[in-house]
Image (cartoon, grey):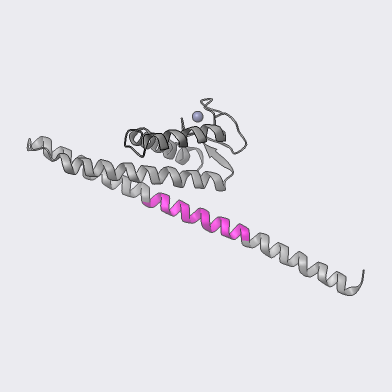
Amino acid sequence: MSNNDILDNIISKVKNAADVACKKTDEVMEKSKLMWTRNQITGDIKKTYEKLGNVIYRSIKTDNENVELVEEYIKQIDGLLAQLTQINEKIAELKNQIICKNCGMLNPVESVYCSKCGYKLTDDAEAEAAQAETAQDGGDAGAGQEAAQADASAKDEASSSEE
Ligand SMILES: [Zn+2]
């Protein structure tokens, strides 16, 4: 091995280490960005629930329903919950985990079935879900259910993975 080879070797090692460090930093950045977004969304959901409660409180007090406003807030909450689900999935992915769509449990990414409820976690379950969604043609029927699951997974995530 000539001196030049040794030098090349060292340079490439340093370069690789830098690349790895860079990738790590990107992941950390990505993760904290996602965590921040999740906090924002969770805050927005809380605020919207509060507004919704307020409208319902007033409507009952004054015996004067404001159905449009109630529906508007519910729509907002459903949208936020859907965003929260996506964020939670991305965070889980970064941690090499997969979220059970049935119960919200975090499982190692290579799991086939959920360790808590036994729900199938693999791709064909996902493909089926995607198919069902397309079949629904983006209708609102499944939104409530998805939202409830998103809420469950958010809670689970918060309690099971404090870091
Ligand atoms: Zn499960």
Tell me what residue is drawn at x 39 percent, y 46 percent: 83
| Residue sitting farthest toward the bottom | 4
Residue 154 pos. (x, y %): 42, 40
The stretch drawn in magenta includes residue 42 = no
- Indicate the quadrant containing the N terminus: top left, top right, bottom left or bottom right: bottom right
Residue 63 pos. (x, y %): 7, 35
Tell me what residue is drawn at x 60 percent, y 33 percent: 111
The stretch drawn in magenta includes residue 25 = yes
Q: Is residue 116 above or below residue 19?
A: above
Tell me what residue is drawn at x 51 percent, y 47 percent: 91
Q: Is residue 75 left or right of residue 31?
A: left
Q: Is residue 26 left or right of residue 49?
A: right
Main secondary-structure element of the magenta-colored stretch: helix
Residue 81 pos. (x, y %): 36, 42
Q: Nearer the viewer, residue 43 or 71?
A: 71
Which quadrant of the figure has residue 26? Answer: bottom right
Which quadrant of the figure has residue 113? Answer: top right
| Residue sitting farthest toward the right | 1
Q: Is residue 11 above or below residue 109?
A: below
Image: magenta residue range: 23-40
Q: Is residue 103 left or right of residue 80?
A: right
Tell me what residue is drawn at x 57 percent, y 55 percent: 27
Q: Is residue 4 above or below residue 56?
A: below
Q: Count all numbered tags in the image, as a single digit.
A: 0
